[in-house]
Every structure is written in structure tokens, then in C-alpha cells.
Image (cartoon, rainbow, N blue to C red):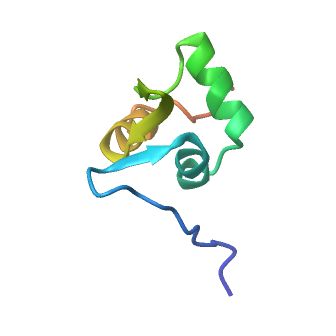
Amino acid sequence: MSNIQSADVFVLPDGRMDRKNAARYLGLSVKTLAMHACRGTGPRFVKLGRVFYFKEDLDGWVGCGARSSSAP
């Protein structure tokens, strides 16, 4: 039996996700993703009244090792 769970994520037709769905997609809390945005360490986002993320930006952020351990 696998411990991996799929998360239902809502993506708008143009590929945007709001912060709640982006956090769910990344496996992070909304607060953690917001803190990354404030610190400038998170994935690229656009602010159109609300904050939105594009899937390719989230994938790129994860692909760059942004979630890797800081242990030596």
C-alpha cells in the first residue's frame, strides 16, 4: 500500500491556481506559501486582486530544489 495521496486541485482554464490550490499542489500550507512570497523565496506569482500561481512556475520552483533539505 502506498502512502502517497493525490490532492484535488482546481486550476482555472488559463492555468492559474489561487494560493490555496497552489499550496495543496505543492504539499505546503497556505501560510508557508504566503511566507515564501513575502520573503521572495517562493515561486513566481501574479497579483490580480488575489494572488495566483501558474503550474509551470510551481513545477519550476520545485525542480530548482527549493524544497530540498538544507542539511549538509
Residue situated in front as seen by the camera: 4 or 36: 36
Does residue 5 lie above or below 53 as drawn?
Answer: below
Residue 55: image location, x then y, percent: 36, 47
Residue 5 image position (x, y, % from top left): 63, 72
Residue 31 is left or right of residue 67, and the answer is: right
Query: In the image, residue 9 lies at what x, y percent?
Result: 51, 62
Left or right of 28 in this view: 51 = left
For the residue pair 27 and 71, the one nearer the viewer reads as 27
Q: Is residue 3 above or below residue 52?
A: below
Outermost residue toward the left in this view: 14
Figure quadrant of residue 61: top left
Residue at position x 55%, y 48% from top? 26
**Is residue 14 in view?**
yes
Residue 65, how many percent across, how many down?
47, 33
Q: Residue at x 54, y 18 (%)?
A: 41
* Quadrant for the N terminus in the image: bottom right
Which image quarter is the C terminus in? top right
